[in-house]
Image (tube, helix red, strand yellow):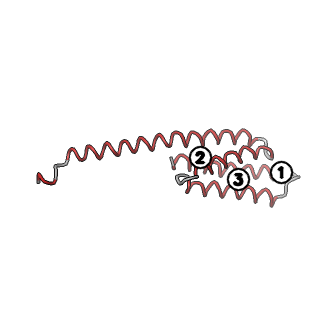
């Protein structure tokens, strides 16, 4: 799950940066405000890559997705891109968990087959 979620967050990092460049064209927004908000969002994208498997990491990821969609009020294209990345986030979490479960099953089966093949310590 960590790899899929981190990949989505890295993609979001770049999208937020490009959205900041678009927001810079708005004469009502100060450059310092745009880059402060975007910088915080970009930092959160990177920081979440490291904590996504810890308790609350997925919830923080969802909060970031909601914020990304809400940024559409500043850059209208972000409504669409935020929805796309929210769908990617859902897929990353959903299928990442399935992959983790499959890996755990495979590891358990491998351990069982290794025990069945190796002789008992008393037999040697």
Q: Residue at x 59, y 46 (%)?
A: 8
Q: Quadrant of the C terminus?
A: bottom left
Tally of numbered discs: 3
Dot in front, 2 or 1: 2
Give the residue at the far right of this rendering.
28
Q: Residues within 10 Å of mark 1 (few under 14, many from 20)?
A: few
Secondary structure found at label 2: helix
Where residue 86 sits, quadrant-wise, is top right
Nearer-N-terminus badge (3/1): 3
CB-based contact (under 8 Å), mark 3 and mark 1: no
Mark 2 vs mark 1, CA separation in Å = 27 Å
Q: Nearer the viewer, residue 24 or 106?
A: 106
Q: Residues within 10 Å of mark 2 (few under 14, many from 20)?
A: many
Picture layout, residue 79 above or below residue 44? above
Q: Residue at x 55, y 42 (%)?
A: 92
Secondary structure found at label 3: helix
Q: Residue at x 69, y 42 (%)?
A: 82
The residue beneath circle 3 is 17
The residue beneath circle 2 is 8
Where does the image place residue 17, in percent across and percent down from the top left?
70, 53
Mark identifier at residue 2: none
Secondary structure found at label 1: loop
The residue beneath circle 1 is 25
């Amino acid at each position: 799950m960590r790899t899929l979620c981190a990949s989505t967050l890295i993609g979001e990092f770049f999208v937020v940066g490009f959205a900041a460049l678009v927001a810079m064209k708005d004469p009502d927004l100060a450059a310092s405000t745009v880059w402060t908000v975007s910088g915080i969002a970009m930092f959160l994208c990177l920081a979440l890559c490291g904590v996504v498997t810890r308790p609350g990491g997925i919830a923080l990821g969802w909060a970031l997705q909601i914020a990304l969609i809400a940024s559409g009020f500043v850059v209208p294209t972000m409504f669409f891109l935020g929805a796309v990345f929210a769908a990617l986030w859902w897929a990353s979490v959903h299928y990442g968990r399935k992959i983790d479960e499959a890996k755990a099953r495979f590891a358990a089966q491998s351990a069982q087959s290794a025990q069945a093949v190796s002789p008992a310590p008393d037999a040697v």
